[in-house]
Image (cartoon, rainbow, N blue to C red):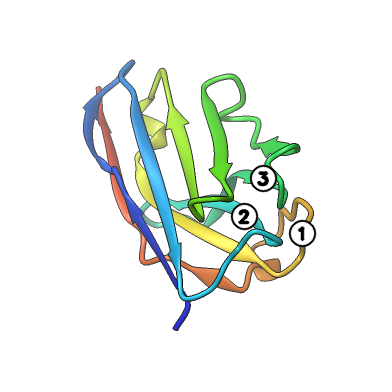
Amino acid sequence: QVQLVESGGGLVQAGGSLRLFCAASGRTFNNYGMGWFRQASGKERELVAAVNWSGSSTFYAGSVKGRFTISRDTAKNTMSLQMNSLKPEDTAVYYCAATRLSDIRVALNEYDYWGQGTQVTVSS
């Protein structure tokens, strides 16, 4: 059974940092593109960052560019999101996702596997 499990969420003050982790099990995602999405209360799920199969290419939403860094370790079947200079508007449930396509994908419906989400709350 394919599973993506997020960890690392929590409560942090504005200006602080958090690092999210996504661990994949049940199959290898070495050839899959992966991404981090978030969904704030009452809003639609949106892409935060994406990475291609090798980690050599990345994409960031404009709202997080320069503050967040996505990376992956293909040997360990893991992915992370380093979040710095956090703002209250970054508060959301963050989801790890994988797409069978090897390149970067930005559309939610192009992702085939999803984690259960981890809550990130940034206080002002």
Q: Indicate which disc residue 102 carries.
A: 1
The total of numbered circles placed on residues is: 3
- Relative to the observer, which residue lies in front, 3 or 27? 27
Label 2, residues with CA under 10 Å away: few <14, some 14-19, many ≥20: many
Q: Position of residue 20 (x, y in %)?
A: 38, 41
- The percent coordinates of residue 92 (x first, y second) are 37, 47
Task: Check disc 3 and give the amino acid type.
Answer: Val
Instruction: Give how far across and how far down residue 45 sits, in percent.
Output: 52, 57
Q: Which residue is drawn at 58% across and 30% down?
A: 63
Badge number at residue 34? 2
Q: Check if mark 2's residue and mark 3's residue have beta carbons within 8 Å.
A: yes
Residue bearing the label numbered 3: 51
Query: Residue at image x 48%, y 56%?
Result: 96
Instruction: Please tell me which of labels 2 and 3 falls first in the chain.
Output: 2
What amino acid type should be assigned to the residue bearing mark 1?
A: Ser
Q: In which quarter of the image is the C terminus?
A: top left
Q: Of 32 and 43, which appears nearest the observer?
A: 32
For the residue labelled by badge 3, is the local secondary structure a helix, a strand or a loop?
strand
> Is 109 displayed left or right of 15 in the figure?
right
**Amino acid on which disc 2 is placed:** Met
The quarter holding residue 121 reads top left
Residue closest to the far front: 75
Q: Mark 1 Cα within 10 Å, few/some/many (few <14, many 20+)?
A: some
